[in-house]
Amino acid sequence: MYICDMDLSAHIYYLLYKYDCITVPGFGSFLVQQKAAYFDADAQLYFPPSKVVSFNEQLQSNDGILASHLATSFGQSYERAVMDMHQETIAWKEAVQKDTLRLPTLGTLALNTEGKLVFTPESGLNFLAASYALPEVPAQPISRTTVEQPAKPPVYFELDQTKSKRVFGYVAVAASVLALFAVGSNSFLNQQADALWQTEQSLRETAREQAALSVYDLGELPTLTINLPKPIPVAGFHVIAGSFRSEANAQRLATSLQRKGYNGAKKLGQTPQGFYQVSFASFPTKREAYNAMSGIKRDNYPDAWVLKK
């Protein structure tokens, strides 16, 4: 079995916690998919939510994620990172033709009888950061025993039925009298409230009629003209030509591209990782940026890629 002696698989492992798809140009893509929590009846265990990894040999186009990460991690240019990554994929292809290719922290790749790559992930992998370090929970059986009925409480004394009925009769009569008194009081208060409301309504109608007959002379008001500036589209999509740690090298490439006819070429601001990226041109929409990238790649710049910033 061949064991890859470079750390490209470790960088893929790290990026799968941030992205759902990491593409190795010319080789394939590693993808993660959400898996809900589930119960294993045989093991009597509850497993937390997770993200499982798979491999797709058909997705081989360079999306720039892995190359940009390598350039940042090793302090090199984007072009150099692409070249190093290409050398590693050549070694992977040669190894998988001979035997099973083991990628540490990811799994193994092998050819089936049809010559297709088959990926087997390592057991226990979970790329869902929210479930990090969550263990399996054992199922706790629920005991369903019969609840004993409490014994009948003892009787200490009994009321005389004749006297109790007489007391309840007195209470009922008193309650009826209080209810009639409350109904009469509420009726009187409601009549007073209705009379007050009608008086207020009459005063409001009189005020409205007086306001409608009044005339206010405000004179001629000046015409107010407001000229709003036209919104300027923000160029947030850039077709990237290269990435440098040295600001001087980045400016040198931007000047060279301008001399070659790329009038929109410029050096972008420094990234949080300390790199200076150079763009061929900048556009307000993704479609315009990708259309321009297609033409730039035909101009012998195959490693051009689009950055949203």
Image: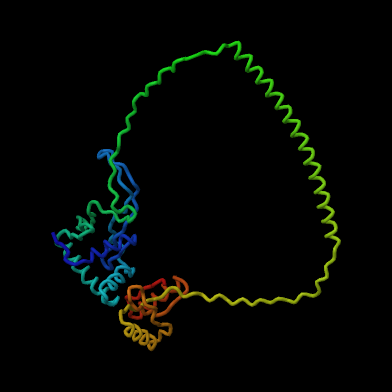
Where in the figure is residue 279, as x and y percent of width and height? 38, 79
255 versus 116 height, above or below: below
* Spot occupied by residue 125 in the image (x, y as percentages of width and height): 26, 54
Taking 120 as reference, is 272 left or right? Answer: right
Q: How many marks?
A: 0
Q: Quadrant of residue 290?
A: bottom left
Q: Is residue 67 above or below residue 117?
A: below
Q: Quadrant of residue 217?
A: bottom right
**Closest to the observer: 27 or 213?**
213
Please give left or right for residue 107 compared with residue 203 in the image: left
Q: Is residue 282 left or right of residue 116?
A: right
Quadrant of res 262: bottom left
Locate the C terminus by quadrant.
bottom left
Q: Residue most toward the front?
A: 157
Q: In this view, which residue lies farthest toward the bottom?
A: 259
Q: Which residue is drawn at the image coordinates 80% and 49% (left, top)?
A: 200
Which of the colour schemes (rainbow, by chain, secondary structure, one colour) is used? rainbow
| Horizontal arrangement in the rendering, residue 201 relative to residue 281 (left or right) | right
- The x and y percentages for residue 265 are 40, 82
Query: In percent of the image, x 81 and y 45: which residue is there?
Result: 198
Q: Residue at x 29, y 71 (%)?
A: 67
Q: Nearer the viewer, residue 51 or 147?
A: 147
Residue at the spot 42% in from the left edge and 79% down from the top edge: 281
Q: Quadrant of the N terminus?
A: bottom left
Of 92 and 234, nearer the camera is 234
